[in-house]
């Protein structure tokens, strides 16, 4: 019996599982959405929500806890560190986005297609979109349709004007050739 044994094993060893969940969390924060299996996504939900909750606090202790969850910020080669980029993105965009939300920052959407290699079930795991951006995109769609409808009439008129000009040019061009050939 597995009493008091929380979490899914995902068929890998403990260090592998820990590294995989860290990597998936980093990818999710970087891209806002990832494709993975439902079992991995369900296990990842705790990490993704925990990181945002800690970022919403905004103090130094929570920043250190996020680094502990996601891995070290030390880098031995020149260039940018992935964890530092993610920390900046957490504090600049994700924490303000979910400022008034008490929890449940992620969404799991199952896909009809399956992975080609092993026929595993797939899903899209993402952070919930910003409510303001949803309203803006809905408003833009309506205005785009109205704008497209109003733009069609002048476009048709312009095409008609161009079409009228083309036959006149083609008719004049053969006459010029015929005059030249007649003169020679």
Image (spheres, rainbow, N blue to C red):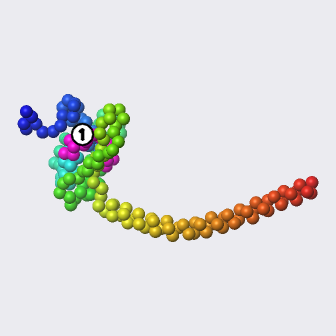
Residue with the mark numbered 1: 40
Quick check: 64 above or below 168?
above
Q: Residues within 10 Å of mark 1 (few under 14, many from 20)?
A: some
Q: Quadrant of residue 38?
A: top left
Instruction: Report the magenta residues as a range.
Output: 30-46
| Residue 68: percent from left, percent from top | 19, 41
Looking at the rendered image, the quarter that the N terminus falls into is: top left
| Residue 163: percent from left, percent from top | 67, 64
> How many labels were placed on the picture?
1
Say if the magenta span includes residue 117.
no
Say if the magenta span includes residue 33.
yes
Q: Is residue 20 left or right of residue 142?
A: left
| Residue 31: percent from left, percent from top | 33, 47
Residue at horizontal 33 percent and vertical 64 percent from the top: 135
| Residue 171: percent from left, percent from top | 78, 62
SS majority, magenta: helix
- Whether residue 34 is visible here, answered yes or no, is no
Residue at horizontal 24 percent and vertical 39 percent from the top: 40
Quick check: 120 above or below 45?
above
Residue at horizontal 75 percent and vertical 62 percent from the top: 169
Looking at the rendered image, the quarter that the C terminus falls into is: bottom right
- Whether residue 122 is visible here, answered yes or no, is yes
Q: State the residue in front, 76 or 104.
A: 104
């Amino acid at each position: 019996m597995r009493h008091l044994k929380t979490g899914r094993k995902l068929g890998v060893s403990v260090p592998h599982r820990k590294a995989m969940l860290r990597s998936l969390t980093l990818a999710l924060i970087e891209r806002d959405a990832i494709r993975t299996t439902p079992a991995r996504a369900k296990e990842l939900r705790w990490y993704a929500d925990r990181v945002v909750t800690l970022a919403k606090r905004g103090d130094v202790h929570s920043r250190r806890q996020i680094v502990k969850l996601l891995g070290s910020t030390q880098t031995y080669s020149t260039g940018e560190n992935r964890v530092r980029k993610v920390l900046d993105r957490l504090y600049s965009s994700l924490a303000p986005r979910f400022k008034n939300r008490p929890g449940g920052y992620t969404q799991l959407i199952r896909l009809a297609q399956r992975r080609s290699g092993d026929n595993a079930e797939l899903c899209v795991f993402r952070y919930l979109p910003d409510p303001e951006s949803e309203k803006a995109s809905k408003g833009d769609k309506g205005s785009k349709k109205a704008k497209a409808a109003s733009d069609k009439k002048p476009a048709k008129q312009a095409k008609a004007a161009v079409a009228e000009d083309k036959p006149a040019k083609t008719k004049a061009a053969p006459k010029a050739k015929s005059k030249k050939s007649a003169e020679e």
